[in-house]
Image (spheres, helix red, strand yellow):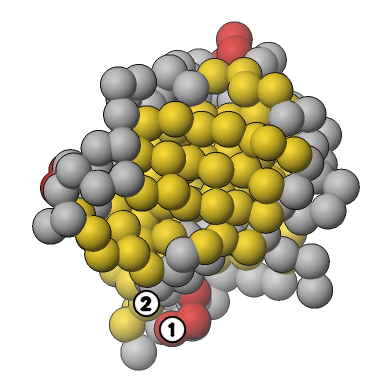
Amino acid sequence: DARVTQTPRDKVTEMGQEVTMRCQPILGHNTVFWYRQTMMQGLELLAYFRNRAPLDDSGMPKDRFSAEMPDATLATLKIQPSEPRDSAVYFCASGKDGPNTGELFFGEGSRLTVL
Amino acid sequence: ILNVEQSPQSLHVQEGDSTNFTCSFPSSNFYALHWYRWETAKSPEALFVMTLNGDEKKKGRISATLNTKEGYSYLYIKGSQPEDSATYLCALSSNDYKLSFGAGTTVTVRA
């Protein structure tokens, strides 16, 4: 079964540490999204890419978050320095040709706890 | 940012009963509307993607309709079962490939 793979599944770190989350989209998918699960908003969009180009990362705190797609098989979300308020589940999702024509497939999420 | 509103926020339904809930959006910014099912401790899974006014889609006991002119979509669950308990997310795509989610409707089916 083709699926989106996220690592790590669980991460506990201390405030101020750097955290990198990785996502392997489904082969052949050209749009990749990073979402954060929040109590108030459900799924908060952080950043997304099409054909590896970042289209919008306005949902991220720019001073500490960065998202990249070094190649078609890897997307990364980095937090430096991490803060307790960053504790959440981060989801990566990929789609073929974008959400205007087809569904997104979600990874299982990376649960981040910042102490 | 597309404003996607879902109502109600939560609902309880007796096993065997049918239910429905709403997703509202600004009709002028419509490209495609998605419905996802999100079970606790799992990841969201797509149910439907709809693009045309009047679209109706069905998967088992779950169906959805779309009215783009008035800016709403309904999701129906017929004969609810305990396994239907989940949060149902509506999302709207825009012309820049962004997919924005509503806060969801959490359905609890009581046996």
**What is the chain identity of the residue bearing mark 1?**
B
Decide which of B41, B34 is in the foreground and name it.
B41
Picture coordinates of residue A87, whole percent (x, y): 23, 52
Left of A86 or right of it: where is A54?
A: right
Residue B23 at least partly seen? no
Q: Tag 1 or tag 2, which sits nearer the N-term? A: 1
On the rendered image, what quadrant is the C terminus of chain B found in? Answer: bottom left
Q: Chain of mark 2?
A: B
Q: Are marks 2 and 1 in contact (CB under 8 Å)?
A: yes
In the picture, the disc for residue A76 is none
* Residue lying furthest right: A28
Q: Residues within 10 Å of mark 2 (few under 14, many from 20)?
A: some
Q: Residue B31 occupies which quadrant of the picture?
A: top right
The residue wearing badge 2 is: B109
Query: In this orientation, does residue A70 appear?
Result: yes
Same subunit, labels 2 and 1: the answer reads yes
Which residue bears the numbered disc 1?
Answer: B82
Vertical side of A58 occupied by A40: above or below: below
Question: Please, what is the three-letter code of the amino acid marked with disc 2?
Answer: Val
Q: Tell me the residue at 68%/47% (across/down).
A: A74
Which element carries disc 1, helix, strand or loop? helix
Q: At which x and y percent is residue B7?
A: 35, 42
Instruction: Count neighbours of disc 1 (C-alpha within 10 A) and say few if under 14, some if 14 to 19, many if 20 or more.
Output: some
Quadrant location of residue A111? bottom left
Task: Work out whether residue A114 or residue A100 is closer to the camera in this orientation and state it.
Answer: A114
Measured in 3D between alpha carbons, the distance from the residue under mark 2 to the one under mark 1, in whole angstroms, is: 5 Å
- Residue at 67%, 59% (x, y): give it: A4
